[in-house]
Image (spheres, helix red, strand yellow):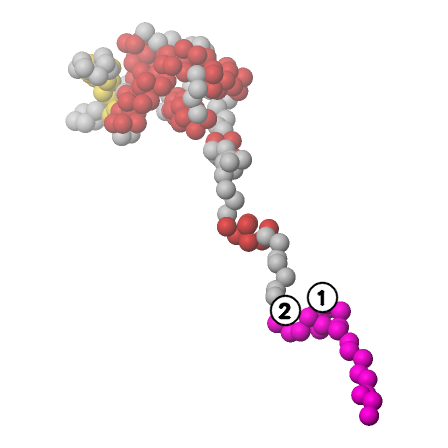
Amino acid sequence: MAIRKHPTKGAGWWQIHISNGRKKKQDTYTYEGSEAEARAFESELRGIPTEASDQRLLDVIGRFLDWYHVNRAARSVKDCEATLPRIITRIGNKHLSLLRQADYNLYKQKRQNDGVSKRTVNIELTYLRALLRFAEDELKIPVGEYPKLYTKKQTAPPAKTPSPHTKPPSSWNNSMETKKPLPCSIPDVVCGTMKPNVRTLTSDPD
């Protein structure tokens, strides 16, 4: 979080950390008062509106990334820092309380037009969901609708269809072959393929 309890002073003392980017040292302020007052003071330092209903995405992103740096892995932080500004550029710097599914559907469509997979879009929107959860739980800012992600069925790869030039499995050939008649090992007359050669017996004259 950008606001933490002071490590050495007693109750009611806070440290406020303001990030100046990854390559610059952050500013640290000490404040005495309630947590709500400390957050209001932090907002003044950042030039952010103090009324919760006036908070926009860009008003919150800095505080969220400060928190994210502390609570998430470095690789995830780097991806999140690259993703959130792109989302805000696509859907606009809206008030958090006014965000709707229509905004997220627009973003999904634009990313599909970019050739991005639905699975990747889900990962990107997960970062936005984390920002909204942080704003609602930690900053007590009212938010609108959370983005709905694609379902597992929607993100599953398409089923492969066999090529027309692909040879069928050998088992198919065996099942499709026409069985040839077995050779008959008993006399033809029994098999019924030949007429019996019947001889007429006559007696020799004496």
Horizontal relation, residue 66 to residue 183: left or right: left
Sequence-wise first label, 2 or 1: 2
Q: Is residue 130 above or below residue 40?
A: below
Q: Is residue 168 above or below residue 128?
A: below
Residue at 71% x, 73% y is 190
Are the residues flagged by discs 2 and 1 in contact, CB closer than 8 Å?
A: yes
Horizontal relation, residue 22 to residue 156: left or right: left
| Quadrant of image for the N terminus | top left
- Type of the residue with mark 2: Cys
187 is within the stretch colored magenta: yes
Looking at this view, name the residue that lies furthest to the top: 47
Q: Position of residue 6 (x, y in %)?
A: 21, 24
Q: Which residue is mark 2?
A: 184
Q: Position of residue 85 (x, y in %)?
A: 36, 14
Asked if one can make out residue 175 in the rendered structure from this viewpoint, the answer is yes
| Quadrant of image for the C terminus | bottom right
Main SS, magenta residues: loop
Distance from Cα at disc 2 to Cα at disc 1: 10 Å
Residue at 55% x, 49% y is 172
- Magenta residues (range): 184-206
Q: Position of residue 3 (x, y in %)?
A: 27, 21
Residue at 31% x, 16% y is 62
- Type of the residue with mark 1: Thr
Q: Which residue is mark 1?
A: 193
91 is within the stretch colored magenta: no
Q: Is residue 91 above or below residue 77?
A: above
Horizontal relation, residue 1 to residue 56: left or right: left
**In which quarter of the view is residue 69 placed?**
top left
Residue at 82% x, 84% y is 202
